[in-house]
Image (tube, helix red, strand yellow):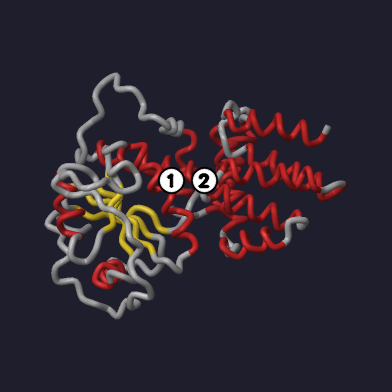
Amino acid sequence: MPSRDFSLHGAIDLGARQAARKQQERRTAPANGGDSAAPAGGGYVVDVTDQTFNTEVVERSQTVPVLVDFWAEWCGPCKQLGPILEKLAGEAAGRWVLAKVDIDANPQLGAYMQQMGVRGIPFVAVVVGGQLLPFLNGAAPEAQVRQAIDQLFEALRQEGILPDAPEGAAPEDGAQPAAPPVHAAAEAALQRGDLTAARAEFQRILDQDPRDEHARQGLALVGLSLRVQALDAARVIQDAADKPGDVQAQIDASDVEMMGGRVDEAFARLLGAVRASAGDDRDAARRHLLSLFELLPADDPRITKARRALQSALF
């Protein structure tokens, strides 16, 4: 575990990729709370460079947890995970800050990531009190990322790294309820990326209690993750645009959108496929839309809206 005196200084350049493009311009939140314009995410998302990492991340982490998103322009999964993290940082409203590191434009930070033994991106670390800890490796749907962040901060509170939440405090807006103890093995398998074990655990729970909504959502999430992991997200979306009449292409694209947290877009895509097709193709689009409903709580208003639209499309 890194020391609480963690610093970028002294990191060795291991030959990380040279900048392939100019770093994407984004207004950054000033570390001193000055009057500069806030970035996207309501001032809680900041671009970090080799030169500003210690100030923007290490020093800032003494007062607020900082999630560090290591990404690159050429990384498709990064483009799925990044917007989800930015959205959640905005919802957190200062309870934590998101720092984004373009490893192409900042080779020292890219090299430091390699020194930690990380070989792939997207990679997310958390820095609290100057202590850097690995957190997420790879993209995931919004619901899974949200839950992982909730569990992270709960674990940090239990270890005394973060103060306990005040007694009687209301849940954060949009926060997912903690998983019941019976789901511990399934959730642990999800966190370590063992989708096969997670699927078996969630199925075992459902076999015992078919009404268990948390397990139902978990099993649906595993299924989505298994389907998407073999797909090239950018190519799938382009194929769907090039082949509007290809229902399988629309189904694959809806999975990619769902994995990226673009629920409305995924539902709209499949509803369009239902309207534009007939026979087996229409039934495939309909059944896939129903399967995506399983990823959300039964009372989610987006499901209600989509069900009405589906009825209209079918009848």
Q: In this view, does 226 lie to the left or right of 158?
A: right
Within the image, what quadrant is residue 311 found in? top right
Q: Is residue 57 above or below residue 216?
A: below
Q: In this view, does 285 lie above or below 110?
A: above
On residue 145, the disc is 1
Q: In this view, does 262 lie to the left or right of 98?
A: right
Q: What element carries label 2?
A: loop
On residue 261, the disc is 2
> Image quadrant for the C terminus?
top right
On residue 81, the disc is none
Residue type beneath disc 2: Gly
Residue at 25% x, 47% y: name it.
Answer: 37
Within the image, what quadrant is residue 41 found in? top left
Residue at 24% x, 63% y: name it.
Answer: 49
Classify mark 1: residues with Cα within 10 Å, few (<14), some (14-19) or many (20+): some
| Residue 115 screen position, x and y as percent | 27, 70
> Image quadrant for the N terminus?
bottom left
Circle nearer the viewer, 1 or 2: 2
Within the image, what quadrant is residue 202 found in? top right
